[in-house]
Image (cartoon, rainbow, N blue to C red):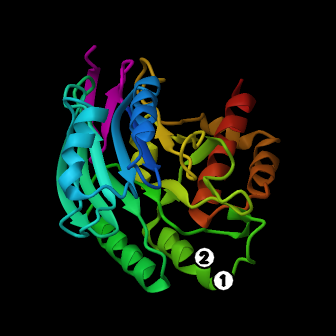
Amino acid sequence: MQAAGDAVASTGVRVTQYSILSNMNVVTWNVRGLNKTYKHKELRIAIKENKMGLLTVLEHRIKECKAEKIIKKIVPGWEWVSNYGNNTTGRFWILWNPHVICFTLLEMDPQFIHGQIKVHEANLAFSFIAIYGLHTIQDMRSLWRKLKELEGIQHGPWIAMGDFNAIINEEDRQHGSQVQDIETMDFRDFLTESAMIELQTYGREYTWTNNHTYSRIDRAIVNAAWMNGMPVSQVQIMEPQFSDHSPLKIKFDQYTGGKTKPFRFFNCIAEHQDFLPLIEDCWKLPTPETYMRRVWNKLKSVKQRLKTLNT
């Protein structure tokens, strides 16, 4: 089905009437090794059941000489890119169904692959960065610096998604070592300086476990253009199955019809006796999230309350 009513807003964000998209879910998954034959079968089943159009496989540990054979076995007919040029063992595969989407490679790094996704069924395009963060603070600072540079040249919606190997606050780790400020401050500073926010999640609470410690180190962060112009505002944390990491999935096939509409309210509502108390109540809502995420959630709460007041 073709999307109708496309228009390009002055911000450069494409506003689209979305139709139902088949097999267009985007998934990132740290599979923690993919050499076992049974894992090939399980991954193939998961791709089909979750209607994946693009899958980023992280930490697969497959040698370059074996990669093509295994990929053809898992997803015959799909196209793919990897970062074997940056790392002999490889950390990334990005696999996609060419009948559904087009992925254009823009940049490759030991910690990310950056590209452009275009969806054939709906005139929809966005920048996509698959992330696999290294473990040292120095490596992570290099990642934040490069992502900040990329953010500065973006002109439309983009999403960075994958295994960051980093946490943002104390609530992101349970039953492990005490969270130190040095573990979180660089990530928080990056989010604040780049004005990016983490997409809300549903499903499992944590994304990685060793059956003792539970952490949320896999996530999806987006820029303002994504929040304003894209149909996806949540990411699903799925069951880990044969891995110690949960896959992350953004779903495009749950949206149907209707153009994105700006929020407006009548000026007379500002004169209503409940207007200012309503704003104050929404702004006092406690939230443990990052600064930009708190602002976005509070504005969203104000919007819903004003709709009720208007009615």
Q: The C terminus appears in which quarter of the rendering?
A: top right
Residue at (46% x, 31% y) in the render: 46
Q: Are marks 2 and 1 in contact (CB under 8 Å)?
A: yes
Q: Is residue 19 magenta?
A: yes
Q: Is residue 142 left or right of residue 78?
A: right
Mark 2 neighbour class, 10 Å CA radius: few under 14, some 14 to 19, many 20 or more: some
On the picture, is 159 further left or further right than 210?
A: left
The answer to whether residue 102 is visible is no
Q: Quadrant of residue 41?
A: top left
Q: Which residues are magenta?
A: 1-24
Give how far across and how far down residue 29 sits, in percent.
45, 48
- Mark number displayed over residue 34: none
Q: Is residue 197 visible?
A: yes
Q: With respect to residue 177, does 35 lie above or below?
A: above
State the image coordinates of residue 291 (x, y, percent, origin top left): 61, 66
Q: Residue at x 66, y 53 (%)?
A: 206
Look at mark 1 in the image and give the residue it sits on: 181
In the image, what residue occupies the spot 40% across and 31% down?
Answer: 47
**Residue at horizontal 43%, vertical 86%?**
138
Secondary structure at numbered mark 2: helix
Position of residue 34 measured from the top left corner of the image (x, y, whole percent): 40, 49
Residue 184 marker:
2
Give the prevailing secondary structure in the magenta stretch: loop
Residue lying at the far front in this picture: please name it: 37
Q: Nearer the viewer, residue 36 or 162?
A: 36
> Which residue occupies the foreground of this view, 243 or 116?
243
- Type of amino acid at the residue the image marks with label 1: Asp
Image: 264 above or below 31: above
Mark 2 and mark 1: Cα distance apart in space: 5 Å
